Image (spheres, coloured by chain):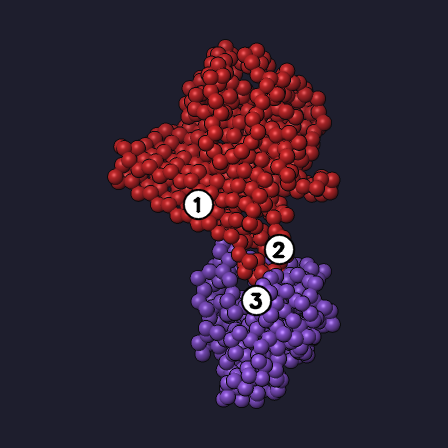
Amino acid sequence: MAAVRETVETVRSIDVDAYKYGFITDIESDKAPKGLSEDIVRLISTKKKEPDWLTEWRLDAYRRWLTMREPTWARVDHPPIDYQELYYYSAPKSTEGPRSLAEVDPELLRTYEKLGIPLREQEVLAGVQDARVAVDAIFDSVSVITTFKEELAKAGVIFCPISEAVHNHPELVRKYLGSVVPVTDNFYATLNSAVFSDGSFVYIPPGVRCPMELSTYFRINERNTGQFERTLIIADKGSYVSYLEGCTAPKRDENQLHAAVVELIALEDAEIKYSTVQNWYPGDAEGRGGIYNFVTKRGDCREARAKISWTQVETGSAITWKYPSCILRGDESRGEFYSIAISNGRQQVDSGTKMIHLGHNTTSRIISKGIAAGRSENTYRGQVSAHRRASGARNFTNCDSLLIGDQCGAHTVPYIEARNHSAVFEHEATTSKISEDQLFYCMQRGLSGEEATALIVNGFVRDVLQQLPMEFAVEAQKLIAVSLEGSVG
Amino acid sequence: MLEIKNLHVEVEGKKILDGLSLTVKAGEVAAIMGPNGSGKSTLSYVVAGREDYEVTEGEILLEGENILELDPSERAARGLFLAFQYPVEIPGVGTMTFLKSALNAQRKARGEDELQTPELMKRVRAAAKKLEINQDMLKRALNVGFSGGEKKRMEILQMALLEPKLAIMDETDSGLDIDALRVVAQGVNALRAKDRAFLVITHYQRLLNYIKPDTVHVMAGGRIVKTGGPELALELEKNGYRDYVSEAA
């Protein structure tokens, strides 16, 4: 996943800020008129040639959304969003239906190349990596290409854009869509249900261990478009899948809204590992521009011994508001959450997780590392709850905050609710500063201030980095170093 | 090698070093002894470049170059090493990783090639063995959970690896038992060379039985009040710092 060095150098030399994915792709796109109304919802549905049941589903969500108000309980501050000033659909003109790589607009391919995303199967096969990664590349509202589909199909794995799944596997989509994040769940999820653009659909049949990692790369390009992707992953009995999500966006002066919904369903003895490296544009040093990342992600360990783990490295976006969660319904099911959330400049993060213990003997583990630098605010908000009938529930939570400099803030808001007397919930938390002593020690040994900070921070987040798939771990370390640039001295 | 000329240093408005002058030649092992509060640690921090110490007057020349404008990492690349009295712990950062980063950062700053991992590991293992440092310790996070003696030996390991021109040892003997002291002293003596100088800061004469100095300086009231040969250390052991403290006052 290493970005092409030369391109990065060029982009970096042009831009003052360190965000190296800030370039804009010059491409013609097909846009819906600005604003949101029933007509726009119908338009989106028509563009995607959706069946009536889905159009109705969207319209129901839209009508419901009109009655709702934005939640205000998070520790984030932003000017009101004018929902009529956004475009709810934008697609590169050259994309229509499934195609081969040879037919994809070369400009689009170049974009993904710049981002270091392996779309060319030949190159990947011939390449250094042993593990191949199937990629679904999403550019603004549409999927550009999904690689390795034939090979996955041989194993019975379905990996395609959700827009395709609606046509080819309607029974699966109808069965599971909205079953983990109901349409009425929250303001942004409801909005997403009305206008969701595209996203990945994954189905792993019983007993199958997905032969390669699956990933989706989201790239927002058009200005003033909201990005509302919807991802649905189903792991049938005894199956396994590891999924990677990557995101980048160009630098713009306006804020862009990203309100995605991700639903994961793990059936009996199945396991889903979901990893994210989120590098949305964070806004400039004065807090101008940047993505609003208001995302609803939830996993349902629906049956016995199901396991879902969320691993994330969040370094971008102006405002991050997300709580990847697990509903531990099945007996002996397990949920895990590993997170590194970095904020710098004027970023705001209110993020965490929810582990809802419902079944018997369920377990969960939360390791959250928050790093605040610059003038940012970083809040961990976590909920661990055991239902009255959830006997034998166990949780271990370790949330640590690291402060760099004296103008940032780190906050922890844990909610622990045990309604069953046999629940055992452990919670450890620390807040620390990178000490002057540690920095001086490293510098005396020859490391620059920034190298020392990166080293110390890497040590701080080690437990979580170890959870990431290897490709992501290396990139994540580099990303962490870049995100902290300018935070020392 | 090191020339300190009339150094005046303040910390939060309080004067700690008051016209300190000192010269250390290449190949020399110089000891600085003095009572608590004489400014010994301040001297080592100021030479190493720690912030919060305001130099109001004077110069520090390392091989003829005034290093006062250089930051700590730049001074390190020029061959300055400080063995800390209280080495910090860096959780999550493996000792080997730390050693590699430090060494290569210095080599890069000097325009040298980076040392490859196999060669580095060879050197580290050899040095660790001589200092009786367990191979296991090298895999753990730097100094985390190490005893006082282990931390001090780790300082000497780093010194051996980084091959400095000027090594300042800030009360390296504090907290060491006899055996650890012997091992540390052996390590230091093995590094003595004609193009390297040592500044050994200590309050007790005992260390100097193992690391025999060429010169002994007595520090009191923020400056050097007497300089002599190794016998000066023995005299201090016998008579204490009384005479020098009153002289400085």
Q: Which residue lies at the image location 52% right of the left edge and 38% below the top edge? A: A349
Q: CA distance from mark 3 to mark 2?
A: 19 Å
Residue lying farthest to the left in this orientation:
A421
Q: The chain drawn red is chain what?
A: A
Residue A42 horizontal side relative to residue B73, left or right: left
Where, quadrant-wise, is the N terminus of chain A in this rendering? top right
* Residue type at numbered disc 1: Cys
Q: Residue A289: horizontal and vertical position, in percent?
A: 63, 33
Q: Residue B2: horizontal and vertical position, in percent?
A: 68, 74
Q: How many marks?
A: 3
Residue A382, image quadrant:
top left
Residue B100, image quadrant:
bottom right
* Residue type at numbered disc 3: Gln
Q: Colour of chain B?
A: purple
Chain letter of the residue beneath label 1 in the structure image: A
Q: Residue A216: horizontal and vertical position, in percent?
A: 56, 31
Q: Which residue is mark 3?
A: B158
Q: Residue A329: horizontal and vertical position, in percent?
A: 34, 31
The mark that comes first in sequence, 1 or 2, is: 1
